[in-house]
Amino acid sequence: MKVEQISIFIENKSGRLAEVSSILGDAGVNIRALSLADTSDFGILRLIVNDREKAIAALKGRGFTVSKTEVVAVEVPDQPGGLASILHVLDAAAINVEYMYAFVERCGANAVIIFRFDETEKAITTLQAKGFNILDGQRLYGM
């Protein structure tokens, strides 16, 4: 139940995000979710896209450094305390969240949180045992 995200290393300067989004748009790649972390010199843009291989080829063809990482997509109720409910389960199982980002498909439905864990398999098993829905790649990429 893991999904693949791509990470792009980009210089922290004006226009680089626009360039990445244009490259992906020109390649017909749709961005489903994203997160950007930066330092003074560079950033790491993490993306869930509908076609990872096409995205990687297009970006590498334009000189970007791109890698794939396995992450876990979990549905959480889009209501106050929804995030806390999942984090308490993870804390009780001593599972570390390395990073996360989220999106809401429709207001009032479920939010989707993308997680990178230190113990991915344990996290999946723990969350499923507590009734959380783990999304597979096909469903996530097609949202």
Image (cartoon, grey):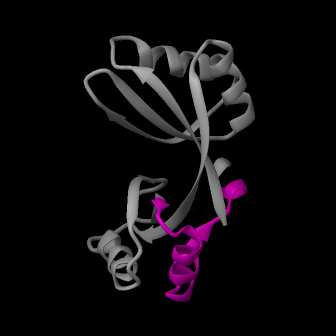
Which residue is at a point 44% across and 22% down the rendered structure image? 10
84 vs 11, nearest the viewer: 11
84 vs 9, nearest the viewer: 9
What is the residue that sits farthest to the bottom in this orientation?
A: 129
In the rendered image, residue 39, in percent from the top left (x then y), is placed at 28, 29
Which residue is at a point 49% across and 53% down the rendered structure image? 105
Q: Is residue 136 above or below residue 10?
A: below
Relative to 3, 102 lies left or right:
left
Residue 121 colored magenta?
yes
Total numbered labels placed on residues in the image: 0
Residue 56 in sight in this render: yes
Relative to 103, 65 lies left or right:
right
Q: Is residue 116 above or below residue 12?
A: below
Residue 26 colored magenta?
no
Q: Quadrant of the N terminus?
A: bottom right
Relative to 98, 70 lies left or right:
right
Which quadrant of the structure image shows residue 139?
bottom right
In the rendered image, residue 111, in percent from the top left (x then y), is placed at 44, 61
109 vs 5, nearest the viewer: 5
Which residue is at a point 67% across and 40% down the rendered structure image? 50
Relative to 20, 139 lies left or right:
right
Q: Is residue 123 above or below residue 55?
A: below
Which residue is at a point 28% across and 74% down the rendered structure image? 81
Which quadrant of the structure image shows residue 128?
bottom right
In the rendered image, residue 57, in percent from the top left (x then y), is placed at 72, 24
Residue 113 in sight in this render: no
Q: Is residue 113 above or below residue 34?
A: below
Magenta segment = 116-139
